[in-house]
Image: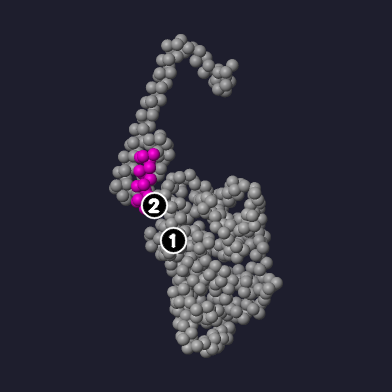
Amino acid sequence: MKITLLAYSEFDGSAIIKLDGRLELVRPPFKSGNIASLDEKDLRYAILHLGFLSSALEYDSWVALIEFLNDKVREAGKIRGDDLSDVDVLRTLIDVAPHEALERYLDRVRDEFIPSRKLDHAESVLLTMIESDAVRESKTLTQKITQLLRSVMEARHASLVRKYRHEDSLFESLQRKGRLDEAHAMGDRIRRTQSVFAFAD
Amino acid sequence: MNLFEVARANGPRLEERGAEILSSLHPESRRKIEEFRIWIFEEARVSINLPPAVLAELTSGETYRNIYESAAEQAVLSGRQKDEILRERLGKYYNRRIAFDMAFSNSEKFRYGVLNAGGAGLTAKFGVFCAVLNKDFLEPSEDMAYLPNDSLVCCFDELGVFDKNRAKRLAASNSHRHWLATIKHAVAVQGIPKELWVQDIVKDDDYIEAIFTSPVSLESLGEVRILKTRYDELWHMAFDDLARKRSDAEKALMKAFARILKAVREGRISLEVLP
């Protein structure tokens, strides 16, 4: 497969490519449904009026092409001083998100992220949400987020308790079998050699 | 050569040609074309198509930059020559763009738009925003010219050589934009109902190009239009799964979209979502 990149936008990674003799527009989120057929006039219009940059680069895979487009957006964003960190993008979206979208996401945190122990992710989203002025204006949302943050803390605590119980049971098991010194020595060996494969010697 | 003076000088000739066409028509057709001419004069404005990031920049107080201004800015940042950057950016269109622009004075300030009497302009394929400039933006503007198609098409001969005389003959001033549209669309308009005129004025490969030099900022914009299909697509991308993992390109697009939504919410721009 040979993909020729004919033009691309540094603003958002939209690109006009030539594949099997056809001109196509690809754009984020770079899924197959986001490809549209174009012609030569569109290419001219994009370069002359939409700020697309002309190119003749060739790629042998979609992955390589999309990596290039993302790199170009990142570089251009850096020059413009645009922060593309996950948190900043999330914060910007939260500020303008409709309440239904925020509510829907909070339901996912409750029903999906907390039960599956994606606690760091859940906590980070909740904290970003609660920092938003738009969210703080809604009492319902603030209460829901506070409640979910509490649930995250409880889930984290429960998880720690489980971990300590597990460690305690391991300790008791080693002690019962008289292998505590052996385990201790193995720990020393791993530290000394800085390799977990030390236990295989 | 000053394009805008040329366009102004063409006024009487365009008016004469338009009147000739009108007088040659059957009274019923003449009445319809006359209605079209008045409709263009009263309704048509200039639109420019803006990628979300550029519109977002305008909402933050920046001004719209044409290719020369963008290249000059990049030259400062990179230390490269402006012309080298332009060549690289425009690729195979460099020669035509430069041939046209360099024939006219002050052309590094040229901004290109489209005469638009409704609809989302040429945005369907690229999913960009169509920013319609204020009516006030047009009225006092002396530096405004219109051509019956893309300047890089209608001002070049079959061999791709710039034809200065053709450009001189075709240009219309702001006060005669309705005559240019009448001459161009007289035949087509007779056969289509009024509600389809909007689509006939701006088609994918056929439109009336507007060239002007006034800077474009947020204050210059009347309304901003986008097709519903694209708006919904952006909306779903943004809010269906707020915190999902995104590529940098998607993040940049989403930030721009969010900034536009914020400007709409704060009343800084008026957004029209078209079916």
How far is disc 1 from disc 2 in space, using C-alphas?
Answer: 18 Å
Quarter of the image with the C terminus of chain B is bottom left
Residue at 51% of width from left, 73% of height from top? B200
Is disc 2 surrounded by few (<14), some (14 to 19) or many (20+) residues within 10 Å?
many
Q: Amino acid at mark 1?
A: Lys
Q: Nearer the viewer, residue B14 or A32?
A: A32
Please say whether residue A75 is visible from this viewpoint: no
Q: Decide if residue B91 is in sight here.
A: yes
Disc 1 marks which residue?
A: B228
Indicate the amino acid at tag 2: Ala
Residue numbers of the magenta segment: A98-112
**Above or below, A176 relative to B31:** above
Predominant secondary structure, magenta span? helix
**Percent position of residue B101, x then y:** 63, 71
Q: Position of residue B267 (x, y in %)?
A: 38, 62
Q: Nearer the viewer, residue B260 or B231?
A: B231
Residue for point 67% across, 70% down? B99
Q: In the rendered view of the protein, which quadrant contains the N terminus of chain B?
A: bottom right
Q: Secondary structure at mark 1?
A: helix
Can marks 1 and 2 be said to lie on one chain?
no
Chain of residue at mark 2: A
Find numbered disc 2 in the image and state the secondary structure of the residue it sits on.
loop
Residue at image mark 2: A97
